Image (spheres, grey):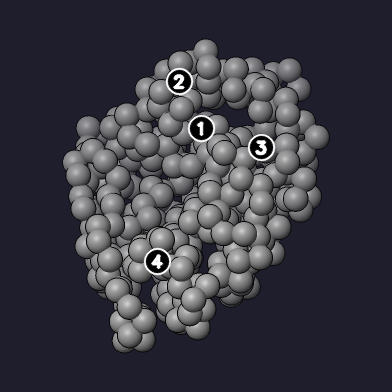
Amino acid sequence: MKKINMNSFIQEVIANKQRIAIPIMTHPGIELNGNTVRQAVTNGEVHFEAIRTLNQRYPLAAATVIMDLTVEAEAFGATIAFHENEVPAVTGRLLNNEAEIETLQVPGLEQGRVGEYLKANRLAAEHITNKPVLGGCIGPYSLAGRLYDMSEIMMLIYITPEAANLLLRKCTDFLLAYCSALKETGIAGVVIAEPAAGLLSNEDCQQYSSIYIKEIVDALQDEHFSIILHNCGNTGHCTPAMVYTGAAGYHFGNKIDMKVAMQDVPADALGMGNIDPVGIFKQGTPEQMKAEVLQLLKDMEPYPNFVLSSGCDTPPEVPEGNIDAFFNALNQYNEGR
């Protein structure tokens, strides 16, 4: 399997006057294939077929997998609620006190649905060879919050930071192993989703999230494997902490002003975002989509390292007309370049 040189890919994106689009988008492919969300998140082949269908239908500059933030928590033993056509959700708390953090075992990659996600990534890498395939996983702080409860983990980092760091250590050890296995499937990179870290100050984001993500970046990122850090909770206050990780790209949510965000993104790294996945992709009109995309592209003209994307994973039941309008607006803009 020939690997894509991601350093060259990023350099070409920056040098090219034509803008590209990499929306985080898999659910429309599930629906086009007549499958349910539950089928896709539990069966690697169904998941892959959704990725392949979207890759064939739309001019994506890279293919992406589902942003499922329950896979890793399930591997640790968390209870997951599945619905036919909604994204899975963690229910309850796996860990209730510091003693349970002490005894928590880092799971192997054979637990839960990890194997099915590795299968989806492997199939995508084998069958989509003309562009990058980007896998996905949760970030360490967001994973810790799903295991210990999101409000409680925020209290823990202030009351007992040693316990919080022990939990984050265990989360990072698992994520490093998982991302290593994802890399071995042949994909070109991974989007690490760390939305909960956006609830922290820049200093705390760096201390309880970025230093751990940097470990993963330092261990795995190379010319054939890029890490993109996603934080849709960031409203602009913790972009410096994100950049501290040294990731090859930074993906922002719709709550942030991209004009402000891009000022902190290094010129040789990609800045990606941030069309509202719910308010515009799902609930907007094609006319609204066109206006939003064209305005964002105009705002981003000073930044050659910008990549058009959704602000987060697009949800189920996004109208096809809105997706078409997204790409049509991009084409219209590029024709004027």
Amino acid on which the number 2 mark rests in the picture: Gly
- Which residue is at a point 46% across and 46% down the rendered structure image? 64
- Which residue is at a point 66% across and 65% down the rendered structure image? 203
Q: Secondary structure at mark 1?
A: loop
Tell me, for residue 257, which label it has, or none: 3
Alpha carbon distance from label 4 to label 2: 35 Å
Q: Specify whether residue 182 is in view.
A: no
Amino acid on which the number 4 mark rests in the picture: Glu
Q: Earlier in the sequence, mark 1 or mark 2?
A: 1
Classify residue 281 as left or right of residue 242. Answer: left
Q: Earlier in the sequence, mark 4 or mark 2?
A: 4
Tell me, for residue 8, which label it has, or none: none
Q: Specify whether residue 158 is in view.
A: yes
Q: Nearer the viewer, residue 205 or 116?
A: 205
Amino acid on which the number 3 mark rests in the picture: Asp
Alpha carbon distance from label 1 to label 4: 29 Å
Tell me, for residue 152, which label it has, or none: 4
- Which residue is at a point 41% across and 61% down the rendered structure image? 151
Q: Nearer the viewer, residue 16 or 113?
A: 113
Q: Give neighbour class at mark 3: few <14, some 14-19, many 20+ (Cα, 10 Å).
A: some
Write down the residue under mark 2: 284
Amino acid on which the number 1 mark rests in the picture: Asp
Say if mark 1 contacts mark 2, CB within 8 Å: yes
Classify residue 215 as left or right of residue 58. Answer: right
Q: Earlier in the sequence, mark 3 or mark 1?
A: 3
Alpha carbon distance from label 2 to label 3: 19 Å
